[in-house]
Amino acid sequence: MSQRTMIVTGGAKGIGREICLQAGAEGYHVVVADIDEDGARATADDARRRGGGASWLWVDMADPASVRSLVDGVVESRGHVDVLVNNAAVTRGLEFFDVSIGDWQLFFDTNARGCFFAMQRVAEFMSESGGGAIINIASIAGKGWSGTSNIAYASTKGAVLAMTRVAAAQLGHLGIRVNAVSPGVTETALFEQVIHERAAQGGASADEQRAALASLASLRRLTSPRDVAGAVLYLASDAAQGVTGQSMNVDSGIIWD
């Protein structure tokens, strides 16, 4: 139980999976939280093989009761939460006039509301145990990057950035650090889904989109999940004890702020 415990929401695939694997390799007990049970179980198995402890729990981030149950379950089994990584998010490729009320509701319920209630519940326990670190996965879309998958998704990530700063200000006296990582175009299954949706709508091919997006970055490359995970592990570490309320862009140099 003395092993540091990290919850990673949306840990079954993509960025979340890579965070879990790197955290496992660094000795964390990782709780892989996801609506995808098979993927969460597989990630937990792989994290254990990297040398850390790992377990998994089902969660629907769009349901505040499910989010609360997740956090309570981790505290009951582990006794403490040292790090929360709010990574779970949903999106799809949509043009301005195609965004529906249902899309807006789903994206905000999952990406923004779920993020807040996970922070709130975890912070209650962290405040009793001397503090901890919360890292929210935002996006350069939330900072106005026009290449976003859709306007509703970008709005949710703007909300995540605002919540990160306010939470950092209000929780700092409790020893809780709150930061965000804002990835750019990251090579994940969700990214592949979006560019193939756009190709199916009559746009450029997936390969053409991939090349065009890479050309926007000063490093002339897309971002990898490993890049993002490295930033998360830094913000979770003792090396970042003086860092809170910040948003670290990990985008290979697409935007500057």
Image: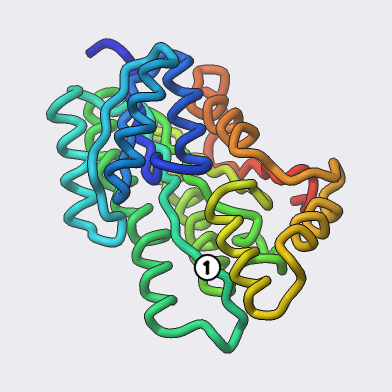
Compared with residue 22, is residue 2 higher up or lower down, i.e. above or below?
above
Give 54 or 144, whichever is nearer the viewer: 54
- Whether residue 135 sits left or right of residue 210 in the image: it is left
Q: Residue at x 57, y 43 (%)?
A: 181
Q: Dot 1 corresponds to which residue?
A: 92
Compared with residue 216, is residue 151 higher up or lower down, i.e. above or below?
below
Q: Residue at x 51, y 46 (%)?
A: 137
Give 111 or 209, whichever is nearer the viewer: 209
- Whether residue 85 sits left or right of residue 206 in the image: it is left
* Residue 175 seen in this snapshot: no
Q: Residues within 10 Å of mark 1 (few under 14, many from 20)?
A: many
Compared with residue 138, is residue 16 higher up or lower down, i.e. above or below?
above
Q: Secondary structure at mark 1?
A: loop
Q: Residue at x 43, y 30 (%)?
A: 20
Give 74 or 243, whichever is nearer the viewer: 74
Quadrant housing residue 65: bottom left
Quadrant housing residue 51: top left
